Amino acid sequence: MNFVNQKNVVFASIFLILFGWLSPAISYEVNKSAVVLLVAKNKAGKTVGTGSGFVIQPEGTLTTNYHVLVDAYSVKAYFQNGNQVDVTGIYKIDRKKDFAILKLTEGTYSTLELGKSSNLHDYDYTSSLGYLSENVKENNGKIEGIVVQTYGFVLGLHPQAYPDTPFIYTTTAFGPGFSGGPLVDRNNKVVGIATIGGKSINLAIPIKHIKPFIQKTTTFSFRELLQQDKNSKEAMYYRGNFYLNGLGDPNKAIDEFEKVLAQDPNFTLARYDLAAAYNDLGMEDEAIRQYEKTITLQPNFPEALSNLGGYYFRSGKIERAKNLFEKAIKAYPNFIQALSNLGAVLNKLGQPEEAIPHLKKTLALNPEFAIAYFNLGNSQFAMNRFGEAQKSYERSLEMGLDFLSMHWKLYEIHLKKKEYKKAKKELKTILDMDPLNDDAKKKLFSLPAIH
């Protein structure tokens, strides 16, 4: 069996595993009555943040992300049945791992059962629950939200910015507002806390980090937390992160990240997000400089490696890009974007046969990743596998990707097959996209007459 065929068997097995495990996992409901919407307000009563959380002890012990609480003077929990309960104290805060354990007003509450995050394996089923920010409505002091459930599977357990702090990487989507919500396994037991969400990059804190603290009995107040956080670099970082990703204000974010780095130049996440903020402002050279500093601090930070590789690829530094994508995949073998990007780099280097396994793995992990179909089409086209290339390009087009170079290659495929009507259509599309393209005009004029 050759290498490519072995890869195909692996990818097919992934799908069989996923579909085999998905059915029993969703045959009964997660206990949504234990999942809450958290609304944090400042001293003036203004909402400074929302997030999700879930009850882990029947007397009212709740957990969420620390970053949901930054700048909060008071926090209230809203249950899906309409109940509103005050958070009366804080049992535990871990700023680095980004979790908090809170106390609700005394009562009897429905809970979620905790599982074992150490038992997770690649491709295990996972599901997450949370309150999407876009669905949260506030009218006359009354707040309502809807619990949303998403589904996916584990991509691995890996460190990100801190070598000693692994996260659960999963395809299960965490939308805005999911922060602090539960990530559950196929038995609906909590294995993680949703923390970072994005395109195929969704990170959860393993529940094992929370378990040692759930029996704590002493609490402190939000007023005390505010006092502690006055000079906290983590509070500044999360505030900057909110400015960047929540409010879309990279300039204010940069101010916060610079404050963090003035305290601690080795704060890896602040470096990483500072690079992202400069990228949003179109300051590519400064973004590259900050990504390079991030990798100096944490050489195996997969997202930083991949992002920097993307800059090098676009600037024509192909070998350097290849090296960074390979390092990202070594750190995180199921990194969807890095796998697709490595495929694109190998195509650029004239190595389409080596690119194909990476691109097929990308699509096995995420069948909706449009750019991977385009990259796969380029590999197949370079190997004269024109029928396969056409299908890959057409799938990419169906998913909304529309590149000029793709239409040129589709034109060439149709021309080779003497499908002149289709070739003409591609040339007209090229001219719609680039009306001054003389080459397309000449080729359109020289096409054989279509009867």
Image (tube, rainbow, N blue to C red):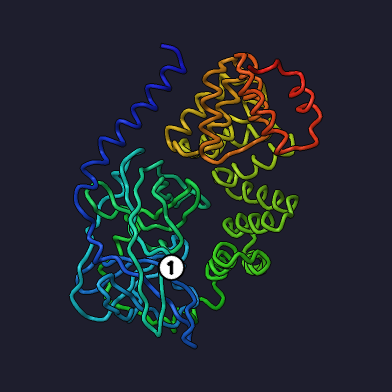
293 in relation to 103, above or below? above
The residue lying at 33 percent from left, 27 percent from top is 13
Image coordinates of residue 268 in percent, x first then y, are 58, 55
Question: Residue 53's quadrant in the figure?
Answer: bottom left
The residue lying at 22 percent from left, 65 percent from top is 111
Helix, strand or loop under label 1: helix
The residue lying at 44 percent from left, 66 percent from top is 133
Mark 1 is surrounded, within 10 Å at the Cα level, by few (under 14), some (14 to 19) or many (20 or more) other residues, namely: many
Question: Residue 63's quadrant in the figure?
Answer: bottom left
Q: Is residue 43 left or right of residue 38?
A: right
The type of residue carrying mark 1 is Tyr
Image coordinates of residue 325 in percent, x first then y, are 59, 36
Residue nearer the viewer, 367 or 338: 367
Image coordinates of residue 76 in percent, x first then y, are 36, 78
User: What is the total number of numbered labels drawn onto the structure image?
Assistant: 1
Residue nearer the viewer, 247 or 286: 247
Residue nearer the viewer, 44 or 390: 390
Residue found farthest to the front = 451
- For label 1, the residue is 66
Image coordinates of residue 116 in percent, x first then y, are 27, 50
Question: Residue 382's quadrant in the figure?
Answer: top right
The residue lying at 56 percent from left, 29 percent from top is 393
